[in-house]
Amino acid sequence: SVTFEDSLFKNCVFEDITSLNTYFRNCTFVNTTFYNTDLEQYKFVDSELINCTFFHVRTGCQISFDDDYSAYWIYFVNFLGTLAVLPGNIVSALLMDRIGRLTMLGRGFTLKHGKPPKLKAFLIK
């Protein structure tokens, strides 16, 4: 995060700038051009813009990699997602152990198509 305070920008060109958490407080801009930047009005706090032009202003949501995206939380959320599928995996493993893999596949085909599958052989030339 960068904050410019009580600064003067005269005859400057800001080009291709992505400025997450950058603010200008009580600054003065004279004959300044902003091209392809994401500097919007709310980033100029108590600032004065004299003869400034804005071209191709970027808008939208930008990703912030501040402290709230620590590795701990990323791994913790991943761990919770893994725990969410654990009961289904346990039930599937117990059923497969009890009735057999081929029987489960056969019943799955039967439930899907309404009749037992026909075995076909394909020869590739």
Image (cartoon, grey):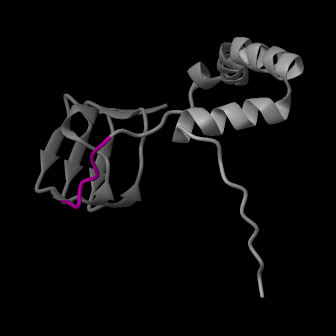
**Residue 100, picture quadrant:** top right
Q: Nearer the viewer, residue 93 or 85?
A: 93
Q: Is residue 94 magenta?
A: no
The picture places residue 23, in percent across and down from the top left corner, at 35, 33
Residue depicted at 82% across the width and 36% down the height? 102
The picture places residue 72, in percent across and down from the top left corner, at 72, 18
Residue depicted at 60% across the width and 25% down the height? 69
Q: Main secondary structure of the magenta part?
A: loop
The picture places residue 14, in percent across and down from the top left corner, at 34, 58
> Outermost residue toward the left?
51
**Residue 125, picture quadrant:** bottom right
**Residue 88, picture quadrant:** top right
The picture places residue 48, in percent across and down from the top left corner, at 16, 39
> Outermost residue toward the bottom?
125
Q: Is residue 82 above or below residue 8?
A: above
Residue depicted at 54% across the width and 37% down the height? 112
Q: What is the span of residues highlighted in magenta in the rendered image?
A: 55-60
Q: Nearer the viewer, residue 84 or 67?
A: 84
Residue depicted at 22% across the width and 48% down the height? 29
Q: Is residue 114 above or below residue 118?
A: above
Q: How many marks?
A: 0
Q: Is residue 59 magenta?
A: yes
Would you say 7 lies left or right of 95 here? left
> Outermost residue toward the right?
97
Q: Is residue 41 above or below residue 98?
A: below
Q: Nearer the viewer, residue 113 or 66?
A: 113
Q: Nearer the viewer, residue 74 or 58?
A: 74
